[in-house]
Image (cartoon, grey):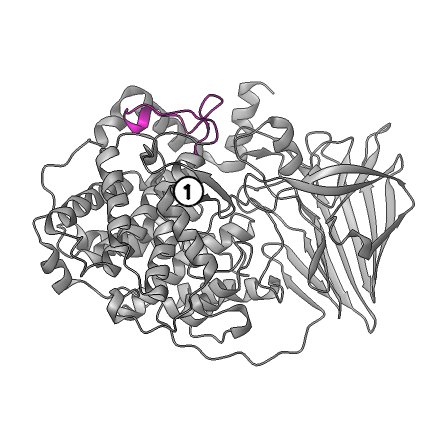
């Protein structure tokens, strides 16, 4: 594709504001204007002491260690994690342990062994073949491990203030303001500060936190918050996802926690105003989320949990429209959650779980959902776990058991759920009000007796080979139909897709006495022909799922392929029969970022324009 056509597609799909701001941003970056907007030091910083801050601190949901009243839980896994941190090993993307050593420099990518230079962040590329995935550099600098240490110190009656505060001081010393890779992304900066302030709050009475160290950390917090504010429009105009949610909240949060800063009132007001605006834009009316990703939905849910709790503790009245939108998203997530707390591995999944207040597996949303529900004064399901709820200092009431419903539908976002006693079928059939994440329209995810039998292959890595991106992010990695091995949309640069799919006919969802029927149709494969439409009919009846796929406008001499990705651990539960030619191939699934595991791929192929498949479960 030539550059002019690519520019035209981006302009048509993302709009003139996106293109105009991106062009202007790049001009500022390359000309040095942007560098001047982000100085490497500020003349006037904090003038208040630790004790003055403690006397005037606004309520945080987290308390100083001795003031906490949670039930003690000496979890051995938590103790093992903290011991690893202290030995120099860190948990990456909530799944992979990497030994960084105790003298890690904060600039080296442990995956590629590339070390970034100490230069202004505007001169550092986010992605390159030499450096590898920059997320490996950012991971420890998020300081998410601090929450594990806080939980461990409380539950085990230990004191690791020296370890935590030394790590923060080491980061400050080795990462001068606006210098290095850890300033490239303002969301990373925001997460770091949220976790730092939690550490300052918890260890505020520790003798390790001297006035001198307190001032050094607070000065860095001030400079980094100035950075986030100055670069906020990048996330609001070009990224417009959980990054913007996190950064807007950070301004509100720092303004609340440090009233001594001269900008505090401005930050608090500006952050809240823009955060409300982002919530109403990013959380769709039906409760779905802008990024078409369950994991990123959880990221936004956790940040807004902080927002709800702190607003309540500081007697800040929330806007009713914002509250109603968040209640809708709570309903959306509850509809998708399994009894074990898991959701399908739908959409982009980079292993993000920034605020871990429990010992559950990364894939479990249950305890985080309970805290979100409690923050909205809605009932929770204690079976999912309540530790998050307790750390947020929330009261809660249990939820009465409800009768299972045959189906749920979220039409604005295009998510549909079919259920019977043993089977749950998740279907995606929708438009893209905002840029799509993956080429997965009409993908289905099937759970049998609480286990994910027919699954989504995940994301793997954001910076990897084109072949792997096309597999995991493209239509090949999803349980839907391909034409001639192509994806439903044309892959553009980085996170962009072109020729967005869209709904071509209203979805039908009907429940009979013994069966549930779904009918959905999308326009897809626009890069091949504007006339192509894919219609999928699904009938759920007892332990069978019958699926008819019909491709309208298919070019001559092309074949269609149904992809079925099976979880090898449970594939014996399902028998697949098709009027196409079935072949079995070895494949991969990525349930956790950066990790690949074996999967089974069944391809059902036909030269015709329709194909019928029956999946029987035992």
**How would you rate the neighbour count of disc 1 (Cα within 10 Å): few for under 14, some for 14-19, many for 20 or more?**
some
> Quick check: can you spot residue 165?
yes
**Above or below — where is 26 with respect to 68?**
above
- The one of 44 and 415 positioned closer to us in this rendering: 44
Residue ID at (30%, 61%):
158
Dot 1 falls on a residue whose secondary structure is strand
Name the residue carrying label 1. Answer: 89
Residue 83, image x and y in percent?
39, 51
Residue ID at (52%, 51%):
295
Residue 218, image x and y in percent?
18, 48
- The one of 25 and 117 positioned closer to us in this rendering: 117
Number of marks drawn: 1
Question: Mainly helix, strand or loop, the magenta region?
Answer: loop
Residue ID at (59%, 27%):
465
**Above or below — where is 376 with respect to 524?**
below
**Above or below — where is 464 with respect to 379?**
above
Q: Which residues are magenta?
A: 111-134
Q: Is residue 262 left or right of residue 304?
A: left
């Amino acid at each position: 594709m030539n550059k002019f056509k690519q520019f035209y597609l981006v302009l048509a799909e993302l709009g003139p504001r996106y293109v105009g701001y991106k062009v202007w941003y790049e001009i500022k970056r390359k000309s040095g204007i942007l560098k001047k907007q982000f100085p490497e030091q500020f003349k006037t910083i904090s003038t208040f002491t630790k004790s003055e801050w403690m006397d005037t601190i606004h309520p945080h949901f987290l308390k100083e260690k001795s003031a906490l009243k949670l039930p003690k839980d000496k979890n051995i896994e938590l103790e093992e994690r903290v011991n690893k941190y202290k030995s120099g090993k860190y948990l990456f993307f909530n799944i992979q342990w990497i030994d960084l050593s105790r003298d890690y420099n904060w600039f080296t990518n442990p995956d590629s062994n590339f070390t970034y230079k100490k230069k202004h962040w505007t001169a550092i590329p986010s992605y390159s073949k030499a450096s590898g995935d920059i997320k490996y550099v950012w991971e420890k600098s998020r300081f998410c491990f601090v929450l594990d240490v806080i939980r461990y110190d409380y539950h085990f009656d230990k004191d690791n203030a020296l370890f935590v505060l030394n790590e923060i001081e080491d980061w400050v010393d080795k990462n001068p303001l606006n210098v290095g890779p850890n300033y490239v992304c303002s969301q990373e900066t925001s997460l770091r500060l949220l976790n730092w302030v939690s550490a300052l709050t918890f260890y505020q009475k520790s003798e390790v936190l001297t006035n001198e160290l307190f001032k050094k950390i607070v000065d860095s917090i001030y400079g980094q918050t100035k950075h986030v504010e100055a670069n906020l429009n990048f996330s609001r105009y070009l990224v417009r996802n959980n990054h913007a949610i996190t950064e807007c909240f950070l301004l509100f949060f720092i303004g609340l926690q440090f009233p001594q800063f001269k900008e505090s009132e401005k930050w608090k007001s500006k952050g809240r105003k823009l955060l409300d605006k982002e919530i109403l834009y990013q959380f769709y009316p039906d409760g779905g989320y802008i990024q078409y990703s369950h994991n990123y939905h959880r990221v936004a849910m956790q940040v807004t949990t902080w927002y709800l709790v702190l607003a309540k503790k500081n007697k800040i009245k929330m806007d009713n429209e914002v509250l109603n939108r968040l209640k809708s998203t709570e309903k959306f997530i509850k509809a998708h959650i399994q009894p074990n707390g898991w959701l399908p591995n739908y959409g982009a999944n980079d292993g993000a779980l920034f605020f871990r207040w429990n010992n559950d597996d990364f894939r479990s949303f249950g305890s985080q959902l309970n805290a979100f529900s409690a923050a909205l004064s809605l009932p929770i399901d204690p079976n999912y776990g309540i530790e998050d709820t307790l750390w947020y200092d929330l009261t809660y009431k249990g939820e009465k058991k409800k009768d299972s419903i045959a189906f749920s539908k979220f039409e604005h976002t295009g998510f549909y759920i079919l259920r019977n006693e043993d089977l749950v079928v998740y279907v995606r059939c929708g438009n893209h009000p905002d840029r799509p994440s993956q080429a997965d329209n009409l993908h289905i995810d099937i759970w049998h007796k609480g286990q994910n039998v027919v699954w989504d292959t995940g994301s793997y890595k954001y910076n990897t080979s084109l072949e792997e991106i096309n597999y995991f992010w493209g239509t090949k990695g999803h349980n839907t139909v391909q034409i001639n091995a192509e994806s439903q949309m044309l892959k553009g640069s980085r996170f962009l897709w072109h020729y967005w799919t869209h709904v071509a006919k209203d979805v039908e969802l009907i429940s009979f006495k013994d069966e549930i029927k779904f009918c959905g149709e999308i326009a897809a494969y626009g890069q091949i022909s504007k006339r192509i439409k894919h219609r999928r009919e699904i009938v759920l009846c007892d332990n069978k799922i019958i699926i008819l796929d019909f491709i309208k406008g298919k070019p001559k001499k092309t074949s269609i392929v149904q992809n079925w990705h099976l979880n090898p651990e449970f594939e014996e539960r399902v028998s697949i029969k098709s009027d196409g030619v079935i072949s079995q191939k070895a494949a991969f699934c990525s349930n956790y970022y950066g990790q690949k595991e074996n999967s089974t791929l069944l391809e059902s192929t036909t030269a015709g324009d329709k194909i019928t498949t029956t999946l029987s479960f035992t």
